[in-house]
Image: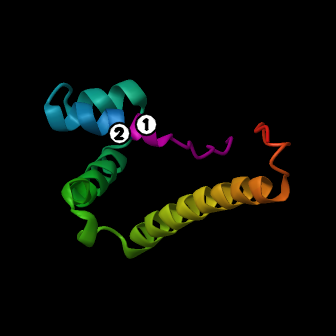
Amino acid sequence: MPRRTRRIFPASFKAEVVRQLLTGERTPAELCREHQLSPSLLSLWKEAALERLPLLFADAQQRDPQQTRIADLEQLVGRQALELDILKKASGLQRGSPASNGRSS
């Protein structure tokens, strides 16, 4: 008897199937039959979606601390890149003579 390989479903597929289930667009039996899913797998996907649903409406203080830290660091890197660019331009202006920067004496 051939061994069944485990199927891997993309997140977008799972989200669409759960959306159809939650909106009542399709019944669990229809979804399972159409996509050859087990009812227990469909239940797991639904539970996972419902479990994470409150995260969609969480404010910045309630988000994952790592995500908040990443956002803070990205802002810092952006500011430093801007400052570095300004300093490079200022440094170039200081090195050049007044005649070389387009001004005549």
Residue at point 63%, 44% (across, down): 5
- Above or below — where is 2 with respect to 84? above
Foreground residue among 78 and 87: 87
Kind of residue indicated by mark 2: Ala
Residue 88's x, y, as percent?
Answer: 73, 57
Q: Is residue 10 magenta?
A: yes
Residue at point 68%, 41% (across, down): 2
Q: Is there a contact, CB below 8 Å, between mark 2 and mark 1? A: yes
The disc label shown at residue 88, or none: none
Foreground residue among 45 and 98: 98
* Numbered range of the magenta stretch: 1-14
Residue 98's x, y, as percent?
Answer: 80, 48
* Residue beneath disc 2: 15
- The secondary element bearing badge 1 is classed as helix
Kind of residue indicated by mark 1: Ser
Query: Is residue 15 at all visible to an observer of this figure?
Result: yes
The disc label shown at residue 12, or none: 1
Foreground residue among 24 and 105: 105
Task: Report how far apart the C-alphas of labels 2 and 1 lie in the structure.
Answer: 5 Å
**Main SS, magenta residues:** loop
Instruction: Give the quadrant of the C terminus.
Output: top right
- Above or below — where is 17 with respect to 59? above
- The secondary element bearing badge 2 is classed as helix
Residue at point 55%, 58% (across, down): 78
Q: Is residue 59 magenta?
A: no
Location of residue 103 (image quadrant): top right
